[in-house]
Image (spheres, rainbow, N blue to C red):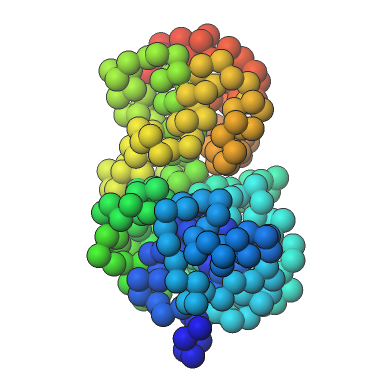
Amino acid sequence: MDEKKPRVAIMGGGSWATAIAKIILKNESNIVWYMRREDQIEEFKRLGHNPSYLSSVIFDTDRIEFTTKINQAVQKAEILVFATPSPFFKQHMKRLRRRIDNKIIVSAIKGIVPDENMLISEYFNEVYNVPYERICALSGPCHAEEVALERHSYLTVACPDREIAREVAQLVTNNFVSSTTSDDVYGVEYSSVMKNIYAIAAGICHGLKYGDNFQAVLVSNAIQEMNRFCNAVYPFHRNLQESVYLGDLLVTAYSKFSRNRTFGTMIGKGYSVKTAQVEMEMIAEGYYGTKCIHELNEKYQVSMPILDAVFAVLYQRRSPVNVMRELATKLQ
């Protein structure tokens, strides 16, 4: 381990956490990496790569200080990058005993806190007293698998404090990742949740053998639906044609690497929700996001026919064939 103290801690052991670690180690001499399971860490050290995710990415483990103790990771680093799936977020945080309100928090979690129906930034602020000025949202369009292959990717860092946003953006910029900044934290977080829902819808249609013409109309309606909801929940001068909104939606709805599209495709082909979840062996964030956004929209009453259709299939167990046939009459 380099004598210089690590500035950054990666919180999570999945594919997105692994991709972020690869990106950051291009700029930092060493990092702290918190993973829940000791056996995963031991295998990682032995093999030189994450045994469960992005196994093609080789790491110099001498530059990584692994720990299964979240409080130890928090103590050692100034910048905490959270990349755990949203359904497990509270489970990890229950172990936290140290203050984090003096840290820079980077949320790479593309989901909402379950049960609370709160954005990750809201949760950090209300539960852990982290000032919004010290909370960043990290978003794409960027698939972990393409980071592993070092295909040119793009990230956006959203934070009310532009100086902190620029600092974090520099941290995740290298020869194969370009980054930009934004101050629309809520818009970036909500769109990150919603694009997964729309990717499930695209997958369901793909599984039902709808063609490219229909998919194009579906996605163009999805960005309008996203715009209506974001403006209702958090009015802000934003341009949803920017890559952090539209670009992230497009790549999630169309890419072969999109687990939400894959999940939706399985549903469209006739798999039950539970069977699709078991066979994927990875979290489709859009499944949880669908329920959260649907419940939030009970308050705002925004017209969201695509969200309603996905909710009907996933939670009301309605026939994908019938639901998508009805949806088709509502799209323009």
Give above or below for 149 relative to 228: below
Is residue 236 among what the camera can see? no
Is residue 195 among what the camera can see? yes
Give above or below for 119 relative to 198: below
Q: Residue at x 68, y 63 (%)?
A: 38
Q: Residue at x 31, y 43 (%)?
A: 247
Side (left or right) of 328 relative to 40: left
Side (left or right) of 290 relative to 221: right
Q: Residue at x 60, y 67 (%)?
A: 34
In x, y percent, where is residue 113? Answer: 63, 50
Q: Residue furthest bottom?
A: 3
In x, y percent, where is residue 164? Answer: 40, 74
Report the front residue among 270 and 192. 270
Residue 97, quarter of the rendered image: bottom right
Figure label count: 0
In x, y percent, where is residue 217? Answer: 31, 22
Q: Quadrant of the C terminus?
A: top left
Report the front residue among 152 and 308. 152
Q: Residue at x 26, y 54 (%)?
A: 152
Give above or below for 330 relative to 102: above
Report the front residue among 226 and 25. 25
Report the front residue among 146 and 326. 146
Q: Residue furthest front?
A: 46
In x, y percent, where is residue 282? Answer: 57, 41
Give above or below for 282 relative to 15: above
